[in-house]
Image (cartoon, helix red, strand yellow):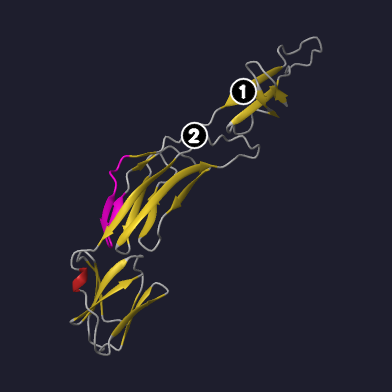
Amino acid sequence: MSIVGGDYAGNYVNTNIDRPMWAGKYIFNLTSKGTNPNVIASPSRAYLTVNRASNNLEWDTEAPILLKVGEKVDLGIFYQADIWCTFNTDYDEELIELSSEGATSNNPHWFATGLKEGETTLYFGIECRKNDMGFYDFTDSRILSKRIKVEPSLGIEGVIADKDSISVRVQNGTILILNKAADSIVRVFTLHGVLLKETKEQEISDINRGIYIVMVGNHSFKVVI
């Protein structure tokens, strides 16, 4: 139903109070609960408009955002969103990895992890999906951008490749150590030198995606999972 002009101008749909009220314009048809035919509801209709709140997207962090290879930083993005919203991002996926915690909660956090040295622009926007009646208004949506610079991690230039027969590679998220002596100890470190795993096995799994240093005896390798 369309109403032209006046306080109630707009496109409406008939509905009832036993359903979620998403953004849009609704008409409630009012009827008497009694059985007396001489009792009628006046007025017989009620009009309701549910407005979509602004996502209030803010990005307070200074630009450019600096991080090192292997480092994970909070991007300082703030907004209001719910389960009906999607997040549109654009950036160089070879340079950074984007992740989030509580994306649709009241305290969202978005992070960038440096993968490779370089610079990229991260574009971030929110879009809320239309409900089944198509009434969402996107005029409050905003897209912000920041320049992100990924710098070399301290000591990464010191990582060497083995010139002998030992080799290390990654396959399906598992680190494979080839041609090592049976008693050689393998250690996996973060780029900041934190020891994650120590073993004599030739296969190492259950390591999160990222960049690591693998030490096999006196030899060291940089691997990307």
Q: Is residue 168 above or below residue 127?
A: below
x, y (%) of residue 36? 79, 12
Given residues 202 and 127, the one toward you in this image is 127
Residue 66 on the magenta span = yes
Given residues 172 and 56, the one toward you in this image is 56
Q: Which residue is mark 1?
A: 48
Circles 1 and 2: CB atoms closer than 8 Å: no
- Range shown magenta: 60-74
Is residue 83 visible in the rendered structure shown here?
A: no
Which residue is at a point 70% across and 22% down the rendered structure image? 3
Which residue is at a point 65% across and 15% down the rendered structure image? 6
Q: Is residue 179 above or below residue 70?
A: below
Q: Which residue is mark 2?
A: 140
* Sequence-earlier tag: 1 or 2: 1
Helix, strand or loop status at disc 2: loop
x, y (%) of residue 157? 20, 71
x, y (%) of residue 176? 34, 80
Q: Nearer the viewer, mark 1 or mark 2?
A: 2
Determine the CA span between mark 1 and mark 2: 21 Å
| Label 2 Cα neighbours within 10 Å, binned few <14 / some 14-19 / many ≥20 | few
Horizontal side, residue 133 vs residue 108: left or right:
right
In the rendered image, which quarter contains the C terminus?
A: bottom left
Label drawn at residue 133: none
Q: Amino acid at mark 1?
A: Leu
In the rendered image, which quarter contains the N terminus?
A: top right
Figure label count: 2
Residue 192 on the magenta span = no
